[in-house]
Image (cartoon, grey):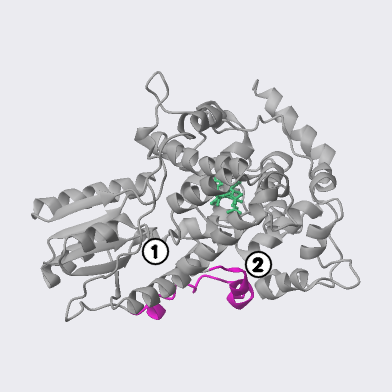
Amino acid sequence: TPSIVWLRRDLRLSDNPALTAACARGGLVIVVFIHDDSVAQLGAAPKWRLGLSLGDLADSLTAKGSRLILRSGDACDVLLDLIEETGAEAVHWSRLYDPEAIARDSAIKSALKERGVEVESHNAHLLFEPWTVETQQGGFYKVYTPMWRAVKDRDVPAPESTPQRIPAPEAWPESERLEDWRLGAAMQRGAEVCLPHQCVGEAAAQGRLGAFVGGTIADYATARDLPAKPGTSGLSENLTYGEISARQCWHAGLHALHEGRGGAETWLKEFVWREFAYHLIYHTPRIASGNWREEWDAFPWNEDAARPEVIAWKQGRTGVPFVDAAMREMYVTGTMHNRARMIVASYLTKHLMTHWKIGLEWFADCLTDWDPASNAMGWQWAAGCGPDAAPYFRVFNPETQLHKFDPEGVYIRRWIAEGTRSPSETALSYFDAIPRAWGLSPQDRYPAPVVGLKEGRERALAAYQARGF
Ligand code: FAD
């Protein structure tokens, strides 16, 4: 009898326990992806990027004599329909940890079980599931370093290989067409400008991991802070859609560590920030939507997203080169260097005193590596209202940061065209990517700062002190 594998953020064939378990049952296997509300609600760039990933996965399944069945609608209804059509007796999926996914999956599990369908969920997304990591007092971790110490020497199961065969039915259930989903429809930007910056699919992700642990990782400890250098792995994009598994990355990192490659331990340590983000979103789901430290509800964040300075921030026109370069990098490539993320987030929440949610939402619309847990943790960290956060009085100075991390201005020249005689191709590509309605041109004058760096900093600190923080 057939089993169904419902893929969500695990778009790969290797180290995919849901797929392996379904194949191991010995019956036929039907692999489905469902366009439900969680897909409909994705921001423009992650939704577009999801479409690329699904296209790649469909090809890989076809090469294995299988197929990717696409259906849209309420996930429970879709699964019930498929069960009826195929006579499937079991459904497998990989667990997710954000509050909406947990609520949906629990309800589906009960509904399927009531009808006598077996449901098995698996861990394919994390190294250490949130409930398996506890403080000595039996609670969850609110600070990263002790969590790192608690998990760093744990055994992580070795990754599973791709199933040899994915037993296929003679007649396939009907599938919708990926093109008809128009997952790129909300990309107002020129998708063709963004496309060359994507590294799509399982094979590409494996290639990227191999190149990183075999080379770049050696200098990671210092190069990871330099936005002009390809000094990090770039794997967040692939981890977001599950084109690669956390375990595959972890074991490759451990191997590099055992081979004595400098940087490997720092990388493994950074990797555990992702685990920490999931630990937090599981144990305190409010991190995704409200101030993690509730006393921050009294802070006078400005929540008006239509203010000219917020629009300037989104469009990379604040007049602060590091901030503008980073915002343009994100718009064109779908990603942004980690140091730059910290700087633009600090600038928006502190210099512009804007509610972090406005930044979080813009990132959710623009990042092809958008991740509900890491994005929420990153924003609350930068704003000062999250767990283990940068204190509010620590206001990044984008100019000092520039001197330290981009002393030769390579990153700035890569992304800013205005005011330069021969702008770089990447800087010009921003103007091909943005909607015409923004009315911007590389011949414009580079804008004056929307707020003086000193003035913005003092204003933020005064508001902070006035509230008795
Ligand atoms: P590498 O340096 O190669 O690190 C390897 C992996 O470790 C990353 O792919 C990522 O999965 C994990 N990792 C590293 N640093 C962090 C971190 N600080 N937090 C969580 N995981 C980390 N990351 C996302 O994946 N999606 C997001 O939506 C996201 N939003 C962010 C928003 C803000 C305001 C900030 C400050 C950070 C955000 N991050 C987010 C974290 C971080 O910037 C990216 O994970 C990192 O830039 C990815 O680059 P990389 O894959 O080359 O990382």
Q: Quadrant of the N terminus?
A: bottom left
Residue 307 placement (x, y as % from top left): 68, 52
Mark identifier at residue 332: 2
Residues 225 and 291: in front is 225
Query: Which element type, helix, strand or loop, lies under badge 1?
Result: loop
Q: Is residue 344 visible in this depiction of the protein?
A: no
Would residue 347 be found to the left or right of residue 335 on screen? right
Q: Position of residue 183 (x, y in %)?
A: 45, 72
Circle 2 — which element? helix
Residue interval drawn in magenta: 177-199
> Which quarter shows the C terminus?
top right
- Dot 2 alpha-carbon crowd within 10 angstroms: few under 14, some 14 to 19, many 20 or more: many
Of callouts 1 and 2, the N-terminal one: 1
Question: Mark 1 or 2, which is nearer the eye?
Answer: 1
Quarter where residue 263 is shown: top right
x 57%, y 48%: residue: 256
Residue at far front of view = 259
Q: Amino acid at mark 1?
A: Arg
Q: Residue at x 34, y 58 (%)?
A: 16
Give how far apart the Cα atoms at labels 1 and 2 are: 26 Å
Residue 250 screen position, x and y as percent: 49, 47
Q: Which residue is mark 1?
A: 12
